[in-house]
Structures are given as structure tokens and as C-alpha cells.
Image (tube, rainbow, N blue to C red):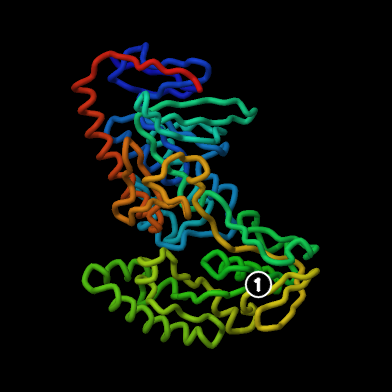
Amino acid sequence: MDYYKEVEGKRVHDHRFGKNTMSTLARCIWVPCPVIIGAGPSGLAVAACLKERGIPSLILEKANCIASLWKLKTYDRLRLHLPKQFCELPFMPFPANFPTYPTKTQFVAYLESYKNRFGLDPVFNKTVVSAEFDDQCGFWRIKTLGLKQEETEYVSQWLIVATGENADEVVPHIDGMDDFGGPILHTSSYKSGLLFRGKDVLVVGCGNSGMEVSLDLCNSNARPSLVVRDSVHVLPQEMLGNSTFGLSMWLLKWFPVRLVDRFLLLVSRFMLGDTEKFGLHRPEFGPFELKNRSGKTPVLDVGTLAKIKSGNIKVCLGIKRIRHRAVEFVDGKKENFDAIILATGYKSNVPQWLKEADMFSEEDGMPKEAFPRGWKGERGLYAVGFTKRGLLGASFDAKKIAEDIERQWKAEATNFMPYIHPLTSS
């Protein structure tokens, strides 16, 4: 007989176990299915893939909503940088009436529809403070804190890390930051350039976010300057009537990476001109070779370069020191600014809470094994969304994880004996 167990008010379906399988002793909860940490696109994707194979899961999310990065920490004008067909999650395409590059609002609506279609019901406001494999009982112990600092421990055979590459903001320490006297904010707190109308704003970081925030500021009648400390590949978002990414994926099926890179750079030079003239120096390696080596993504231009060429967006070298309402640069120049926006990216937070040294690197919180082997660890540990390949990579991971767990699930269903392991709370 099918049986439903209540876990913190969430229904977890499991056909293998009788009604005594879940024991709760002093907030220690036995979960007879995979536990997924994170309810972003990656967590939703792997939960859906499991569900399609008849396997339930329990999703724990520290925020009060799914896709909290997209909902709470992105600017208003954000769109997907890649065409929608390269960003869809498993088993559900984007609506046909969505544009090629869906807006932030449209993407969030897609994720909500995805959650509802597969009946996914995350447990919100649960911050994982530690997850550790217990050799004595042979399970993962996941300790969480709720809104009122109440402690709950979940115990499971499978742990799927879906917190992703962008869990925490990277906020660099720059000499003199405390002396600035004006707003210094990360792009996670930036919403619109309208708040900076008529202001001189320094944007630190020249990735896709830094470029797009600079454009947004410019279009809002602010006066942005862009710090470009490192080399960067800027490519047109579309070339030869196709998305640059889609064309690249097609070319890579037939030609080696270096040849594809040469083609992309040749077409980009023809369409965009010599970016070096404007302070945007290209790296030694081509865009896709660099992506494979370091994970650094090329910038897909959505209009920023034209503003740089016209002088509406200034390009500055690295920062030497911040003064009161001013910044000194490494080339000796000093300019006044009303605000500083840090487009310095995000990082994984896995080392802060996962007590495991084999699968994830302590240095950057990423799997030690490169794509496509980084999704599986030992003793029921998995990772989804750490491929540095966006939503395509997350979908690849999700499918692989579901396949692997299904094999164990079926084997255990065949060999199952009605035994409950004694669990005690920490």
C-alpha cells in the first residue's frame, strides 16, 4: 500500500516503506528519499528528474521562495543571455509565446510553472548549517536552522547539493573602502539605474553583469565608468542571423575548439571592430578554449560596446585606492564618483557547511572533478549545477543523478527488509 509521511508539513511519498519508517526524535527526521539542498533551477531540475522516475525527494531552501537569486538578487532589466532553448529544464520547454531571450519575470514564471507541473513542494526558510556523513549509522546528517533559530536534523541515504556556483556574493576588499562616504553596493542589491540618474557611478567588473549594469545606468541618464582590470572577450549576442551561442554549439560538433574560436573572433572583429582600442583587451586564449580552461564566460554584447565607443561609458584601469567620494586608479588618474557598484560575481558556499573533503574543493567550493564527471561523489553524495555551463550543464547533471539513484532505488526496493535504523538527535 502506498504511504505518505509528513515531514515538517511536507508530504513525502515512498512506496517501499511502512508507516513506521519515519521517526522523529527531538527534531531528528528520517527521510527515506534524496534530500536536495537548494530550490533554484538546479534543485528543481533534479527533483523533477527523480519524480519522473517515481522517486520522491525533499528540497530544503534557506530563502522563502524558489529561485531566490533570480527573484531577490537580480536587476530589473535582466534577460537570459542565451536563447531560451538552451536554458530550459528537463521535460518542459519554454512557452512558445516567450521571446528568444526571456525577461527575468518570464523566467521566474517559467520556474514557478515547472515547480507546479511536477508537484514540487520545497521546505522553505531552512538554512543548512552542516551536512556530514555518519559512518556509524551509514547516512547523511543534515542540520538546519529555521527562522526562529530552531534546529532540525534530517537524515538520509542521499544528499544532493544544488546550491550552485552563485550562492554568495564576492565582495573584494579595496583599500580605502571605508573612506568613500557614499553608497558601495554589490549588483545583488542593484535594481535599476533610475536611482542613480545624474550621478557619476563606478562599476567594478567587466563580465556580463558589469557590462549590462553600465548600459542600464547609461540609459537612465547616469554617468557610468567601468573598471576593466583583466582581459575579456566581447562577442556580439548574435552573428550571421543566429545566436552566437547556438552557432558556436553547431560549429563545435564539426570543428575543433581553436578553429571555432578563430572564426568567432574574426566575425566579432568585423562586427564590433577592434575592442583593444577601447581598453577591452582580449585574452591569450580564444573564448571557448578559455571557458574550458578556467570557466570564464565571454561577454555577449547587448549594446554596451556602442556606448563605450561613443564615450558615454568610460573604461578605467584597475583601482589603486578609494578616497572620499573619489577613486585613484593604477595609471595615476583620480576621478570623483557618487556611488560604486561591485559587479564582482558570486561563489559557491559549499565549504561553509558540507563536512566532506573528497568531492568538493575547499578553495572554491566546486567539484574537484571537471565536467562531465563532477556530478557524483561517494556514499550517496551528488552535485548539480556546478558545471560552469549554465542551465544546460545543470540539466545534464540532473538527468545523470536521477539515473544513478534510480538504480539504487530499484535494487533496494527488491531487497528491502522492514527494518528501521535507530536514530538519535545530536
Q: Is residue 314 left or right of residue 324?
A: left
x 58%, y 62%: residue: 344
Q: Is residue 255 left or right of residue 392?
A: left
Q: Nearer the viewer, residue 40 or 144?
A: 144
**Outermost residue toward the top?**
20
* Residue 299 to residue 183: above or below: below
Label 1 residue SS:
helix
x and y percentages locating residue 68 in the rendered image: 54, 45
Residue 232 visible at all: yes
* Disc 1 target residue: 218
x 47%, y 86%: residue: 273
Work out which quarter of the rendered image holds the N terminus and state it.
top left
x 59%, y 48%: residue: 72
Q: Is residue 19 left or right of residue 301?
A: left
* Residue 360 to residue 35: above or below: below
Counting other residues with Cα less than 10 Å from the Cα at mark 1, is it few (<14), some (14-19), or many (20 or more)?
A: many
Q: Nearer the viewer, residue 362 or 330?
A: 362
* Residue 285 to residue 6: above or below: below
x and y percentages locating residue 19 in the rendered image: 36, 12
Q: Nearer the viewer, residue 297 or 76?
A: 297
x 61%, y 55%: residue: 188
**Outermost residue toward the front?**
136
The amino acid sitting under disc 1 is: Cys
